[in-house]
Amino acid sequence: MAGLAEEENRQGMSLPPQPPDRDQETERYRQMLDALSDLGEAMVVTEAGKMLYCNDAYERLTGYTFAELAARANLIELAPPELQADLTRRLADRLAGRVGVEHAAESQLVTRDGRRIDCEFSIRMLAGEGPNRILGLIRDITPRKQAERALRESEQRVRAVVDNVTDAIISFTQDGEVLTLNPAAERMFLCDHTHLPALQVNDLVAEGSRAQFSAALAEWVLGDAPSGPPREAVGRRQDGTIFTMEYALSPMDVEGGRLFLATMRDISDRKAHTEALEYQALHDSLTGLPNRTLFGDRLRQKVLRAQRRSATFPLLMFDLDRFKDINDSLGHEAGDLLLEALAARLAEVLRESDTVARLGGDEFAVLPDGMPGPADAITTAQKILKALEAPFEIEGERIVTSASIGISVYPDDGDDAASLVRRADVAMYAAKRSSSGYALYAADQDRHAAHRLSLLTELREAVSAGQLVLQYQPKVHLRSRTTVAVEALVRWQHPRDGMLSPDNFIPLAEQSELIRPLTRWVLEAALQQARAWWAAGSRIQVAVNLSTRNLHDSELPAYLADLLRANGLPAEVLTLEITESAAMDPEAADRLLPISNLGVNLSIDDFGTGYSSLAYLKRLPVSELKIDRSFVMALDTDADDAAIVIPTIDLGHNLGLSVVAEGVENEASELMLLRHGCDFAQGYHVSRPMIAGALQGWLESGEWPLAPLT
Ligand code: C2E
Ligand code: CA
Ligand code: CA
């Protein structure tokens, strides 16, 4: 359509606005266009760009009047200036037949009031009318264009978001065919659009996670899945490496069916971090073993599993027998090292699948794997005890330790975690009294345990509230028939239960720290009493019983020295009775020499009930051996007892010790002992234990007067 432009240049632009001198033509075109006007389209007829005629709709569209339009040299001027050249060229193309006539072109025009409107126009050569005559149809498409622009803008915004988010976003079909990947997805899975045609969403998920991923997808395919929290899966990159990811799925209904969007995020870092935190929260930092919280969790799970299967399983709990002493004497660091070493030994003897936990302090728990019975629990307990037999080498010290293991069994001893723990704990205290080192829970231990607790609280007060009293039982020299000493025996004047014998509370005190103040009270009371007797002229010796635990107290020798000095008594006045088993305890034995060096006498009590090695006994700085009353009480009638007692007398003498028989209940026994050379006797036949005030009278009236001064 070079013609139109040329024409325009040649004459259109130079001519002044033409008056309507073409009335006839105008009239023709009016008739023609009006006939078409029910189409409502704006129409115009031009010749070389100049308007010959336009209809009302064209006037309305442009805002110009017919006259104003007719006055223009070229209608192309209605287009925005920057589009005019382009529009001119397109018109030319069209008129030259290079573009299909029917094809509508889009452009813009500026209305009289300055608005830009989008329009679509189609033109038709009116060849029969004249060389450069054109019929133009112009349609306002502004609303559609605006909508398109809005859509494009919003698409661009969405695109920008999708392209820039750090989450991977992929879309895929119901069949799992991946349609799009955003840049984050390309980076995350190490793939790009070149993988696309064949890429399946399952290729992005590691094999182990596929079933679960497909199940999550199926929920959406089948219906509207609830939008729960994101789920986790193991993602798979195109190079085959894997990582933990979090994903959310959502359906997208589009023309032609349902698509899916998956938003995925690599959470391996976060997961590693939370796992580390979780680990810390659930494990003991010293030993790395599960802590109380995790153990509680495992135990509850185990209860549930056992419930479902109607199975049974044991719970073992134990603590170290002298841990506090070790901590006190060697320091907390050594204590920590011991616990670490202990954890390592446990790991050696137990299976990896067993749960071993440190509940706190020196308290441990074991939950054997599977559903073993009580017999297996005992085997496990024995394994643990055996593992502790060899001494621990801590900071150059050899530490000997042992444990007491309590066992409770689901469901006999409890059908929930709390009662199983409580009962294993009860059994643990029973284990402390047993020689095997372990005990299965038994209901009567529980009564005992409840009693024990309240008793322990009361006993603590009894020591300071002056409820303890001492009674004294004479020890007599058989050959000279004189009294040489008394043994102080403690009683508890209980405000509610009356006078309690030591068997009711000493074992309890021995299991706690309470034995220390209790023993000190006895020692102080006994020495004060001795001082009073000595002041009154009765030079009598006093024997006091010690517990093994007292001998672990490194301050004991110094304490004794101070106490003797404070009472102005020679050390020889005091005899300390220690049991055979205490004498065999290496740490306790270490304490004997400094005590003996003070001048205090040491006596092995309850002899015959333990398993002492004679060679060992020989090396101890003891001077006396007390044959246990269980062998003596029926000595006169029981040949077996005699067969033990008589050689023991000789044994003691051979070791250079004086021999005491306690529990002498009748004259026949007394005579037998005398005949076989036993040095001293103690027993109801001589005297029952008595209060201090009764001693003087007994000494004066009885057959056993105080030994004369030597
Ligand atoms: P033990 O040291 O063997 O004390 C002797 C026990 O035998 C005393 O019992 C005494 O009353 C009893 N007994 C004395 N003669 C006879 C007799 O002829 N026949 C019978 N059947 N028994 C006799 P008790 O006073 O009940 O003391 C029991 C145990 O309590 C003591 O046994 C001792 O191991 C412990 N104990 C007593 N007082 C103390 C104390 O102050 N400290 C410590 N650590 N233990 C103590
Ligand atoms: Ca004794
Ligand atoms: Ca005894």
Image (tube, grey):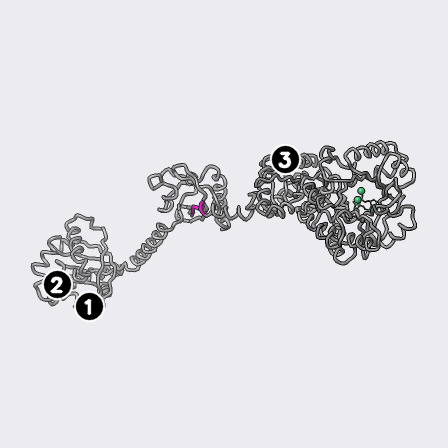
Mark 2 lies within 8 Å of ligand 1 (Cβ measured)? no
Question: Marks 3/2: CA distance?
Answer: 117 Å
Q: Earlier in the sequence, mark 1 or mark 3?
A: 1
Q: Position of residue 387 (x, y in %)?
A: 63, 35
Frontmost of labels 1 and 3 is 3
- SS for tag 2? loop
Amino acid on which disc 3 is placed: Ala
Question: Marks 2/1: CA distance?
Answer: 15 Å
Question: Marks 1/3: CA distance?
Answer: 116 Å
Q: Magenta residues, as a range?
A: 263-269
Neighbour class for label 2 at 10 Å: few (<14), some, many (≥20)? many
Amino acid on which disc 1 is placed: Thr
Q: Position of residue 688 (x, y in %)?
A: 87, 47
Q: Position of residue 180 (x, y in %)?
A: 37, 45
Ligand 3 sits in quadrant: top right
Residue 211 visible in image: yes
Q: Position of residue 496 (x, y in %)?
A: 81, 56
* Residue found at the far front of this picture: 710
**Pointer 3 residue:** 390
Is 431 in front, or is 36?
Answer: 431
Do the numbered discs 2 and 1 sit on residues whose CB atoms are within 8 Å? no
